[in-house]
Image (tube, rainbow, N blue to C red):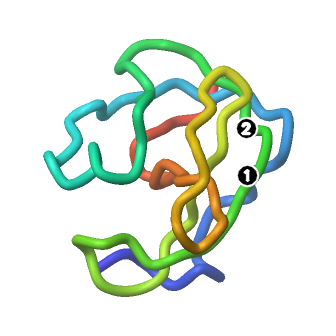
């Protein structure tokens, strides 16, 4: 289970981050079409908390300037779990 939202590091909009985990479950294909690639650098354009469909509990999701996906049925763009990235 991920840590509570208050335990997250001080991420910020505009921060450069590197993807370290690009292994996504097949169920992720139902929510997103474009995914970050391990080793590539991205820019945080937004952050949101949410409940992932596979892992219970809250998580911090990044919206990336270089990756855009269609909105889900609840009107939100899918974010990518913060643990998939490290600060550059």
Q: Is residue 86 left or right of residue 22?
A: right
Q: Is residue 43 left or right of residue 7?
A: right
Q: Which residue is mark 2?
A: 44
Quarter of the picture containing the N terminus is: bottom left
Looking at this rendering, what residue extends furthest in the top direction?
40
Q: Which residue is mark 1?
A: 11
Q: Residue at x 53, y 60 (%)?
A: 72
Looking at this rendering, what residue extends furthest in the front direction?
73
Note whether 41 is above or below 16 in the view shown: above
Q: Residue at x 42, y 43 (%)?
A: 32
Note whether 9 is above or below 62 in the view shown: below
Q: Residues within 10 Å of mark 1 (few under 14, many from 20)?
A: some
Q: Give how far across and how far down residue 57 sits, in percent.
A: 39, 86
State the image quarter where residue 19 is shown.
top left
Which of the two labelled residues, at mark 2 and mark 1, occupies the earlier sequence position? 1
Q: Is residue 4 left or right of residue 31?
A: right
Quarter of the picture containing the C terminus is: top right
Q: How many marks?
A: 2
Residue in the foreground of this view, choosing between 86 and 66: 66
Q: Give how far across and how far down residue 64 sits, in percent.
A: 66, 34
Q: Residues within 10 Å of mark 2 (few under 14, many from 20)?
A: some
Residue in the foreground of this view, choosing between 28 and 1: 28
| Whether label 2 touches label 1, CB < 8 Å | yes
Q: Residue at x 42, y 51 (%)?
A: 83
Q: Which mark is residue 28?
A: none
Tag 1's secondary structure?
A: loop
Q: Is residue 51 left or right of residue 65?
A: left
Note whether 11 is above or below 76 in the view shown: above
């Amino acid at each position: 289970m991920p840590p509570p939202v208050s335990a997250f590091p001080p991420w910020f909009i505009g921060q450069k981050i590197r993807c370290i985990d690009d292994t996504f479950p097949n169920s992720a294909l139902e929510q997103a079409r474009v995914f970050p690639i391990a080793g590539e650098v991205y820019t945080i354009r937004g952050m949101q908390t949410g409940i992932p469909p596979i892992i219970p509990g809250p998580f911090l999701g990044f919206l990336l300037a270089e990756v855009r996906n269609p909105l889900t049925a609840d009107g939100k763009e899918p974010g990518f779990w913060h643990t998939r990235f490290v600060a550059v």
